Amino acid sequence: MANAPATTRAQQRADTRERIVEAALEAFAEKGFRGASTRDIAQRAGTNQGLITYHFRSKDDLWQAAADRIFGMLQKSLGERLGSLDVRDPRERAREAIRAYVRFAAAHPELFRLMVDEGKNSEDRMKWLVDTHLKPRFDEFARAGGSPISGSNPSLLPHAYYVMAGAGSLIFAVAPECRRLTGLDPTTEAAIEAHANFVADLLAP
Amino acid sequence: MANAPATTRAQQRADTRERIVEAALEAFAEKGFRGASTRDIAQRAGTNQGLITYHFRSKDDLWQAAADRIFGMLQKSLGERLGSLDVRDPRERAREAIRAYVRFAAAHPELFRLMVDEGKNSEDRMKWLVDTHLKPRFDEFARAGGSPISGSNPSLLPHAYYVMAGAGSLIFAVAPECRRLTGLDPTTEAAIEAHANFVADLLAP
DNA sequence: CCATTGGCTTGTCAAGTGAACAGTTCGCTG
DNA sequence: CAGCGAACTGTTCACTTGACAAGCCAATGG
């Protein structure tokens, strides 16, 4: 009987791509699109730079894969949390949605960093991000949280959306700064819960 | 009588430095520290790259000058606004401080972009920024706005600070994204006032 | 068992990058 | 008005960047 190979080709391919995407997400969030080099990403993934252009044609394609990954995680995380919630009261559902979002922002500050890095310019990456990932999230926000938060005034929806995103994410996105500035480590469980409740109390009291 | 020179040497020097710092602030906010090149900055300022290393020894020094500029503007802007306000009620003063901050964030989104770009890592620029500019602002926030906002619970101060900063700034920092995502142009006077009131109502109702 | 495939490695390239420096201009001072 | 020195310019240097081409070798399938 021939030795079965330790890892099949398909497995290896998938594993490598996964490692690269994860490293890319980390690097892009940390240094921005231009600041992160493909060599740095390759090193974090434990491979070489040439392999990146082999699996992903270009740096842009790799960035899209990284964005797909983090937004996929967000959708899955929020979906699970709200799906298994049998509360009908809209305000209570809105509160729980806000708290779920804050917890996700704490666990994955890369999401916010990516959004800010790209949202400030009008390049193709921003347009792709809005059309592919942000639009669906915003529409869902309008449906679920609009009324309890913005008081059923639709013209306030954009304000409410960006207030929630900014208020819920910033402290985790600049965690090193927060530690040095305030002494509070926002990555602790207690700080995360305190922040989630603080934001929920503000937006859906 | 000898012709007085069109511009004195001191004027020329100051003008040039000013143009470079302004261009640098713009570029750093737009592309991040690593993403912005000194050549790009020189071009925006209408000069050449060599002049930058002449006036500012290094790219780091130029970045500090840019940070000094935007934080100086913030301090001046808030100081003027609150100085000429003869309202004694703490809550009303807090509301006005919040609204003043939101207006500044709208007029100068570079402030928030710089903070996020640097606050996410632990490099020297972040430490310098905290010690030199952020610490004083945070202390003042604790003195003036702490009680009306965080309900006199000092352990909530960091949360309140980052909620205000994030909620008040994000929509302006990612204005191109906001336009495409929601249809709302956050740079209009109406949108700015709406946002200022929205945030003030949340934090100091 | 061997030819082939395809994931991966290595080496190379043109286009930048920040810093440094020699050369040029010109306002100011003596 | 001479000439010093500060403001400015253009170029060079050592290095990094993303992309690509050629070759390597283990898994695959006949």
Image: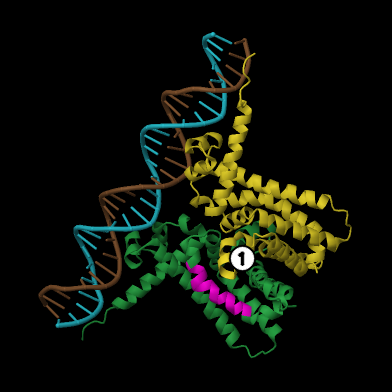
Chain colours: A yellow, B green, C cyan, D brown
- Residue B131 is inside the magenta segment: yes
| Element type where label 1 sits in the image | helix
Residue visible at 81% across and 57% down in the picture: A144
Give the quarter of the figure containing the C terminus of chain B. bottom right
What chain letter is assigned to the residue under label 1?
B
Q: Examine the rendered structure and indicate whether residue A135 appears above or below residue A165.
A: above
Q: What is the x, y in percent for residue A142?
A: 77, 58
The residue type indicated by label 1 comes to: Phe
Residue visible at 59% across and 66% down in the picture: A178
Q: Quadrant of residue A14?
A: top right
Q: Which residues lie in the magenta part?
A: B128-142
Q: Quadrant of residue B41?
A: bottom left
Q: Examine the rendered structure and indicate whether residue C2 appears above or below residue B181.
A: above
Main SS, magenta region, reads helix
Residue with the mark numbered 1 = B172
- A124 relative to B194 in the view: left or right: left
Residue visible at 26% across and 82% down in the picture: B4
- B169 relative to B35 in the view: left or right: right
Give the quarter of the figure containing the N terminus of chain B. bottom left
Q: What is the x, y in percent for residue A9?
A: 60, 26
